[in-house]
Amino acid sequence: MIYADVIVDISLEKLDKTFQYAIPAAWEGKIRPGMQVEVPFGNGGRKVLGYVMELSENPKIAPERIKELLGAAEGSIPIESRMIALAAWMKRRYGGTMNQALKTVIPVKKQQSKKERRTVVLRLDEIEAQKALAALTARKRHSAAKERLLEELIRYGSIPWEEITERLGIPSALIREMEKSGAVRILREREYRDPLQRIPTEERIKENSEQRAVIERVREDFKNGERRTYLLHGVTGSGKTLVYMELVEDVLARGRSAIVLIPEIALTYQTIMRFYSRFGSRVSFIHSRMSPAERFDQFERAKCGDISVMVGPRSALFTPFADLGLIVIDEEHETSYKSETVPRYHARETAIALAQMCGASVVLGSATPSVESFAAAEAGEYVLLTLPHRAKSRPLPVCETVDLRRELREGNRSILSRRLQELMEERLRSHEQIMLFLNRRGMMGFVSCRACGHVIKCPHCDVSLSLHGARTLRCHYCGFSMEQPKTCPACGSAHIGGFKAGTQKVEEIVRQRFPQARLLRMDTDSTRGKDGHRKIVEAFAGGEADILIGTQMIVKGHDFPNVTLVGILAADLSLNASDYGSAERTFQLLTQAAGRAGRGGAPGRVVIQTYHPEHYSIQAAKAQDYSAFFANEIAYRRLMDYPPAAHMLVICTTSPSREDAAAAAEQIAGILKKTEERLRLLGPTDAPIAKIQDVYKKVLYIKDKDAERLIRCKDKIEEAILHERVLQRASVWFDLDPMGLI
Ligand code: ADP
Ligand code: ZN
Ligand code: ZN
């Protein structure tokens, strides 16, 4: 008799273990690990779904007491045992149940018919198409959408249907109309391997010598059977994408497949078409707006070898390729690589674990690597590769800082410094574009002095205190609190208070100062609706406005060649966010924002307005000097034992009842103090947002150099949850090495 260890598909900590079922004769030899099966469960023998973890010949209890499973769930295909191993790794490291981990790595099949994949192919040759385009343009009432589609098709030859309808925003009726007129052909899925299909070919750019050195290094290692993690540190515009594509090509030539992770916000039409042009029908994409069924379909295609490259955000990591050879993570420092639901995994760490399981290489790319990754490269865990120059030999922009304390002293109370106003006037006169960036991430109401720049910090944790209610200042890590002083403790000025500014307010001020300028604003309000974001990007790229005002949304992934001035209005907003990563994020944001200036021919200028021009993050961003930033930042992390100098585990308890959340947190603190000696425990304290939608949140932090010790603490708490009432009355979850505040 063969027995299957099955994990029952109910997300309850209590049931997070395997149950043994016997395999009935009819299913012998057909049930394999990773399959979804139907099993009778509980006293009533209710039919539930589960996953097979393992098969064995040894019954764990008396064989007559073991029930038989009912059979494989409909449409279930075994995932490789590798995915189960990966889920087990994630559960152990990040906490939560095995079920939650399995659901993260295995897309759940939902009843829904397969969507047919369609591609629109240009039927005209280039000369005919150009003629048709000219004819369209010449017409009095011409159709802008039709022109655009024709232009794009001339450029790429063929384009996936969804890219046209969703990203280019062209109605499907128009595509059909063009099909009728004979200008385009629509290819259906089964025609995909039609040899007559015109596969688009990107004009191959030849790699430069710096790029070649990087490519050669990874390629040689791969050939020699060495699998490493590489950190590709390349300045903005150094041509990292070309490096990724060459490496993917190389891996494909060896019969392996590749996953390329890109932050959601950078998954633009341009990026997608670059990969599509290069890899055609061998590549597929996933993004967060896809339904689970669509995602499932793409994973199926990967499993059966229909495609060999997957490009997408964090979750694309779980594409079930049979022979994965390479994982690329672009913009590896991005916070979106960390999951915000249990298990709260980091895609970088998980990619490295996955790569080890399947003999793949990992390439992490960034212009501003995370402190974690750079430290790992310095320690020799990752191989550091660099691209120090821009690929198109454009100079990096010229940065200057403006001291806002001085502006105030000299009588300017506006959010626009005199220097910035002067440069804006110049650009408006010469019809060049301007971006104004208000860095609002992590804005949690810190208190600072506008006369001397002094920020009130926690005496124990060296992070900014934040304002709660009218006058209380509190530390998010240790709970330290004090009353807000009425005058600055450093200089005695009464100009002390919270720093408040929103993009709408900035828009008003700019409109008053430059009434003739055409303005666009991009923030979460103005980008609501399906195409909000794209419309603003296109309007600005099309020259419909002189000034774009926005939050971090505007600094990522867009190329606006006519922008020659970037103004960063208040660098301090992210610098004083009250968590240990605030200096790092400031440096990253400033570098990225600066990288937006001068992408076209004209050189760019960047003005950084700040109360802390002397701060190393700002100095290093101004000089575009990553090593100077890193040296300062790693010293701070070591001094304070923040990651990567030590690991940090967040334990969070939540409940609709304030008392229950607090009691659970206290209980956990008690358990830890009792069982672990000399543990560095902070809290429990209220979470930064202590109550969200009527759920109360308490947090504890533990720091330790040894991640294993923190995992052991987590295991102990998870164990206690199984039998302690107080812990069961709240939800408890974990976050190892959090990014930003919980
Ligand atoms: P990054 O991602 O490193 O910021 P990109 O990959 O977007 O940079 O490349 C920046 C620009 O440089 C792109 O327009 C790209 O086509 C161009 N480029 C990349 N490599 C080369 C090269 N070897 N020769 C000429 N242009 C290149
Ligand atoms: Zn002061
Ligand atoms: Zn503190």
Image: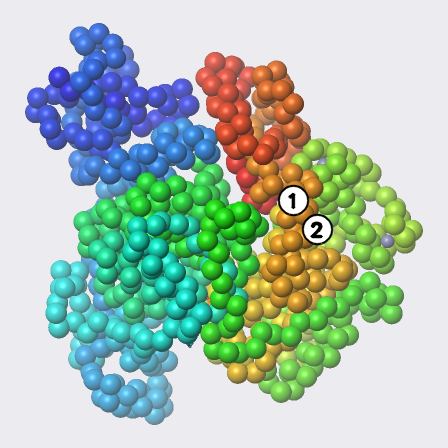
Image quarter of residue 27: top left
Residue 686: percent from left, percent from top: 65, 32
Q: Is residue 420 visible?
A: yes
Image quarter of residue 546: bottom right
Residue drawn at x 12%, y 31% is 30
Does the residue tagged 1 have its C-beta within 8 Å of any atom of ligand 3?
no
> Which numbered dot is residue 576?
2
Q: Disc 1, disc 2: CB below 8 Å?
A: no
Q: Nearer the viewer, residue 736 or 222?
A: 222
> Which numbered dot is residue 325?
none
Residue drawn at x 42%, y 73% is 209
Amino acid type at mark 2? Asn
Residue 68: percent from left, percent from top: 17, 18
Q: Nearer the viewer, residue 637 or 340?
A: 637
- Single out the residue that lies furthest toward the left: 26
Q: Quadrant of ligand 3?
A: top right
Residue drawn at x 32%, y 77% is 203
> Which numbered dot is residue 637?
1
Residue 167: percent from left, percent from top: 37, 66
Amino acid type at mark 1? Arg
Q: Nearer the viewer, residue 491 or 659?
A: 491
Q: Decide if residue 686 is on the left or right side of residue 31.
A: right
